[in-house]
Image: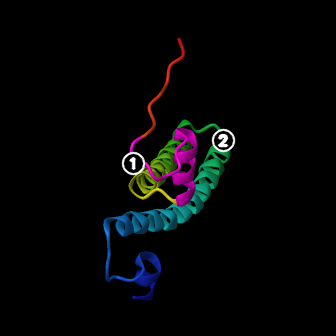
Amino acid sequence: MILFQIIVGQPQNFTFGDLIVTGNRIIDLILIFSVGTAVIAMLWAAYIYISSFGSEERAKQAKNIWYFTLIGLAVMLLAKVIIATGLRVIEPGPELRENIDRVLKTDGSSKTPPQLEFKK
């Protein structure tokens, strides 16, 4: 129950934004575990490759471990990017709102962007 409260927070008033934040926290925990596991798997693949002594089968096994480890890491990082993008799109923080206002040169009170003027 304590782990649930650390990851999710307070269960009452749970919104869609909270779901995205919870997904981000879970992905962070899984990413920490998967990076550690990937390092161990790559070290194991290197050991198998070095100790193969010319055996094509063991060298191929080591290369497969290496490739699948990289693919798994790429999938985990992509999941992190997708969740982080969802956080930015659904509930942009104040620093993102300030950057949007600065780029659009508004004071934040207008809901529509200013009209662009073209020089002739």
Spot occupied by residue 71 in the image (x, y as percentages of width and height)? 48, 44
**Amino acid identity at mark 1:** Lys
> Is 98 covered by the magenta stretch?
yes
Q: Secondary structure at mark 2?
A: loop
Q: Nearer the viewer, residue 12 or 7?
A: 12
Q: Please tell me which residue is depicted at 46% across the width and 53% down the height of the picture.
A: 109
For marks 1 and 2, the one nearer the N-term is 2
Up-down relation of residue 39 to residue 46 (above or below): below
**Amino acid identity at mark 2:** Phe
Name the side, left or right, on which 87 lies relative to 51.
Answer: left
In the image, which residues are magenta? 94-112
Q: Which residue is mark 2?
A: 53
Q: Please tell me which residue is depicted at 43% across the width and 48% down the height of the picture.
A: 110
Q: Please tell me which residue is depicted at 56% across the width and 40% down the height of the picture.
A: 103
Q: Secondary structure at mark 1?
A: loop
- Marker count (numbered): 2
Spot occupied by residue 111 in the image (x, y as percentages of width and height)? 39, 48
Q: Nearer the viewer, residue 8 or 87?
A: 87
**Looking at the image, is mark 1 or mark 2 nearer the viewer?**
1
Q: Which residue is mark 1?
A: 111
- By what rule are the colours in the image chosen? rainbow
Identify the image quadrant of the N terminus: bottom left
